[in-house]
Image: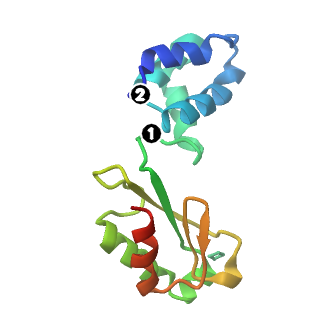
């Protein structure tokens, strides 16, 4: 069921004061509700808080937690940190890109998978590391990529 962005945005601000310090909590709630920050919602929040739209947009692009476009059902994250890099992390990333047909920051057309990279998962002993949603896969090989992506279908 598709959410009515205008209605849901009003619901999000219904219990808030028009204090600009509410911007981040409002954006967090919207992100949780929509899975991303639709432009229409950001315009409504700007009007509600009496802030320039550029301020709301600037905050939403500054924090990595906020997405400006819908993301896929599964989030695939490949580590680009040093430990993973020296143990073949780039090959893992290239294989994921090849199998999904997308680059980091992109989502497959069927909205199933979004590919992202990270600077370090903090699991360097398991390098190279790939995470699918909340599942961590360590000591990755290119042959395991297909098996793991197959489980997301
Ligand atoms: S460098 Fe990849 S987990 Fe730390």
Between the residue at mark 1 and the residue at mark 2, the CA separation in whole angstroms equals 8 Å
At 37% from the left and 55% from the top, the residue drawn is: 106
Residue count near mark 2 (Cα–Cα under 10 Å), binned few <14, some 14–19, many ≥20 = some
Q: At which x and y percent is residue 143?
A: 41, 86
**Contact (CB < 8 A) between labels 1 and 2?**
yes
Q: How is the image coloured?
A: rainbow
In depth, the one of 151 and 101 nearer the eye is 151
Q: Quick check: is the Cβ at mark 2 less than 8 Å away from ligand 1?
A: no
In depth, the one of 62 and 93 nearer the eye is 93
> Can you see residue 50?
no
Q: Which quadrant would residue 62 be assigned to in this image?
A: top right
Q: At which x and y percent is residue 11?
A: 57, 14
| Residue 151 appears left or right of 98 | right
Residue holding disc 1? 68
Q: Quadrant of ligand 1?
A: bottom right
Quadrant of the rendering where the C terminus is positioned: bottom left
| Badge 1 or badge 2: first in the primary sequence | 2
At 57% from the left and 82% from the top, the residue drawn is: 128
Callout 2: SS: helix
Q: Which quadrant would residue 22 be assigned to in this image?
A: top right
Residue holding disc 2? 39
| Residue 24 appears left or right of 99 | right
At 42% from the left and 25% from the top, the residue drawn is: 3
Dot label at residue 20: none
Residue count near mark 1 (Cα–Cα under 10 Å), binned few <14, some 14–19, many ≥20 = some
Q: At which x and y percent is residue 105?
A: 42, 56
Callout 1: SS: loop
Asked if 146 appears above or below 103 in the picture, the reply is: below
């Amino acid at each position: 069921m598709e959410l009515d962005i205008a209605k849901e945005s009003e619901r999000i601000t219904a219990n808030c004061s028009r204090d600009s310090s509410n911007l981040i909590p409002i954006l967090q709630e919207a992100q949780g509700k929509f899975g991303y920050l639709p432009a229409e919602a950001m315009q409504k929040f700007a009007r509600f808080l009496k802030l320039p739209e550029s301020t709301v947009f600037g905050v939403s692009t500054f924090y990595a937690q906020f997405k400006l476009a819908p993301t896929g059902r599964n989030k695939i994250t490949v580590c680009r940190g040093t430990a993973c890099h020296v143990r073949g992390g780039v090959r893992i990333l290239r294989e994921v890109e090849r199998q999904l047909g997308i680059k980091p920051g992109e989502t497959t057309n069927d909205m199933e998978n979004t590919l992202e990279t990270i600077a370090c998962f903090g699991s360097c002993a398991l390098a190279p590391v790939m995470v699918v949603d909340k599942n961590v896969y360590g000591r990755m090989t290119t042959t395991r990529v297909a098996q793991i992506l197959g489980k997301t279908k």
